[in-house]
């Protein structure tokens, strides 16, 4: 295992421990239930309110993980299509704004971030496959990529496909977490065993995907530098 892999898994373990600590020390269950009750009180407007919040969070480059989990507690698996549609709409608007409205300002801002510059250079004007690798990469926050990619020669079609594919793994994990929280009232051993094994398998699949993506992106960056 290389030094980079050790750091990656160390950060992953620390993130899981931090999440577990926050769940134990903070009234996370109360907050999630409160959000579910608030959206339920809105009736048919509840999903629209959730989608609107997700859309704004995407535009403002706010991490959407807590919101996705809360949405799954409120709406179950329906939170997934709502989150995907809202995040895609926000991503497209950020991409267009970056390309046509804030291009020079963002270019100066990104120039001070070597990791983001290297990732953008590695993508270049590549197709949707290469772009999807970047969207899956943990090097640059997903919502920040929306603005960064507006400065490249990436076409809208490739951008849309890579955005949807890049969001899927993380969204599945977050929605699964919300489903576990929503079903927390069941105390049977079989229930928790099923949920635990399913979550572990999902996290392992996402981690393996990110590991392969990281190696491919590093190779691409090295080739670009050469």
Image (tube, rainbow, N blue to C red):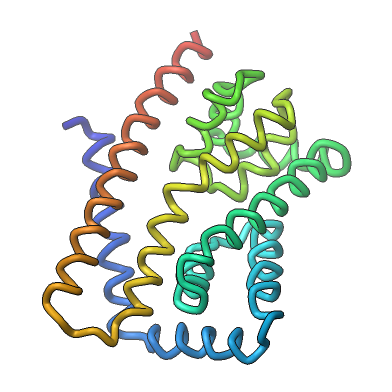
Please tell me which residue is depicted at 54% across the width and 85% down the height of the picture: 35
User: In the rendered image of this protein, does residue 119 appear above or below residue 91?
Assistant: above
Please tell me which residue is depicted at 47% across the width and 87% down the height of the picture: 31
Please tell me which residue is depicted at 52% across the width and 84% down the height of the picture: 36
Count of labels shown?
Answer: 0
Looking at the picture, how far across and down is residue 48, in whole percent? 70, 72
Q: Where is the N terminus found, in terms of image quarters?
A: top left
Residue 125 location, quadrant? top right
Furthest-right residue in this view: 101
Please tell me which residue is depicted at 15% across the width and 68% down the height of the picture: 193
Looking at the picture, how far across and down is residue 164, in whole percent? 57, 43
54 and 77: which is toward the camera: 77
Residue 183 location, quadrant? bottom left
Looking at the picture, how far across and down is residue 137, in whole percent? 45, 38
202 left or right, relative to 144: left
User: In the rendered image of this protein, does residue 162 appear above or below residue 89?
Assistant: above
169 left or right, relative to 97: left
94 and 117: which is toward the camera: 94
Looking at the picture, how far across and down is residue 133, in whole percent? 48, 30
Furthest-top residue in this view: 226
56 and 46: which is toward the camera: 46
User: In the rendered image of this protein, does residue 167 appear above or below residue 83?
Assistant: above
Furthest-left residue in this view: 189
Residue 155 location, quadrant? top right
């Amino acid at each position: 295992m290389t030094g980079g892999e050790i750091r990656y898994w160390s950060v992953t373990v620390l993130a899981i421990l931090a999440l577990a600590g926050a769940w134990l020390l903070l009234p996370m269950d109360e907050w999630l239930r409160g959000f579910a009750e608030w959206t339920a009180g809105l009736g048919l407007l509840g999903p629209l309110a959730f989608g609107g919040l997700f859309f704004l969070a995407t535009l403002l480059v706010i991490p959407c993980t807590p919101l996705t989990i809360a949405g799954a507690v409120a709406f179950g698996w329906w939170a997934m299509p709502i989150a995907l549609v809202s995040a895609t709409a926000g991503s497209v608007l950020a991409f267009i704004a970056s390309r046509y409205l804030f291009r020079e300002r963002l270019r100066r801002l990104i120039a001070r971030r070597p990791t983001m510059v290297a990732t953008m250079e590695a993508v270049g004007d590549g197709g949707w496959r290469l772009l999807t690798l970047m969207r899956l990469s943990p090097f640059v926050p997903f919502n920040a990529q929306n603005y960064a990619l507006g400065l490249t020669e990436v076409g809208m079609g490739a951008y849309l496909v890579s955005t949807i594919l890049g969001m899927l793994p993380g969204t599945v994990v977050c929605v699964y977490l919300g489903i576990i929280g929503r079903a927390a009232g069941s105390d049977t051993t079989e229930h928790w065993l099923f949920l635990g094994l399913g979550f572990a398998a999902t996290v392992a699949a996402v981690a393996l995907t990110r590991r392969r993506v990281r190696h491919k992106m590093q190779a691409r960056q090295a080739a670009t530098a050469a």
